Image (cartoon, rainbow, N blue to C red):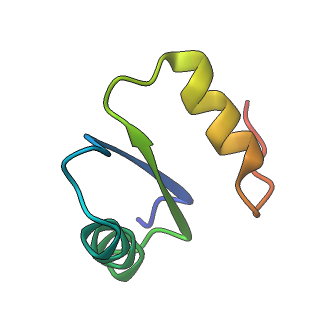
Amino acid sequence: MPAPLVVIKASLRSVSEIEQECLLKSAERAGAVKAIIVDVEASNEDVHRAIEASPLNFLWS
């Protein structure tokens, strides 16, 4: 079943913009409606802020 949102944690210092785009496209081709990348050092609060800032609105239960 496709996931509505995939959060990819990666080291943004060592992953180029082109590699980030490839990661996002790969997740979306695998079934994600939306994928976002956050730094591997991001806290849970940072991840939640990134989710809330994504263009799609998701309902969390």
Question: Residue 41 appears in which quarter of the rendering?
Answer: top left
Lateral position of residue 47 relative to residue 58, left or right: left
Lateral position of residue 50 relative to residue 20, left or right: right
Lateral position of residue 59 relative to residue 13, left or right: right
Question: Residue 26 appears in which quarter of the rendering?
Answer: bottom left
Please state which of residues 61 and 19 is positioned toward the viewer in this rendering.
Answer: 19
Which residue is found at the position 48% from the left and 17% from the top? 43
Please state which of residues 57 and 46 is positioned toward the viewer in this rendering.
Answer: 46
Instruction: Measuring from the top left, give residue 34's x and y in whole percent.
Output: 56, 66
Instruction: Measuring from the top left, give residue 10's x and y in whole percent.
Output: 27, 43
Location of the N terminus (image quadrant): bottom left
Q: How many marks?
A: 0
**In the rendered image, the vertical position of residue 50 relative to residue 22, given as above or below:** above
Which residue is found at the position 61% from the left and 18% from the top? 45
Location of the C terminus (image quadrant): top right
Which residue is found at the position 31% from the left and 31% from the top? 40
Which residue is found at the position 30% from the left and 76% from the top? 18
Instruction: Measuring from the top left, give residue 4's x and y in whole percent.
Output: 56, 60
Lateral position of residue 12 relative to residue 7, left or right: left
**In the rendered image, the vertical position of residue 43 relative to residue 25, given as above or below:** above
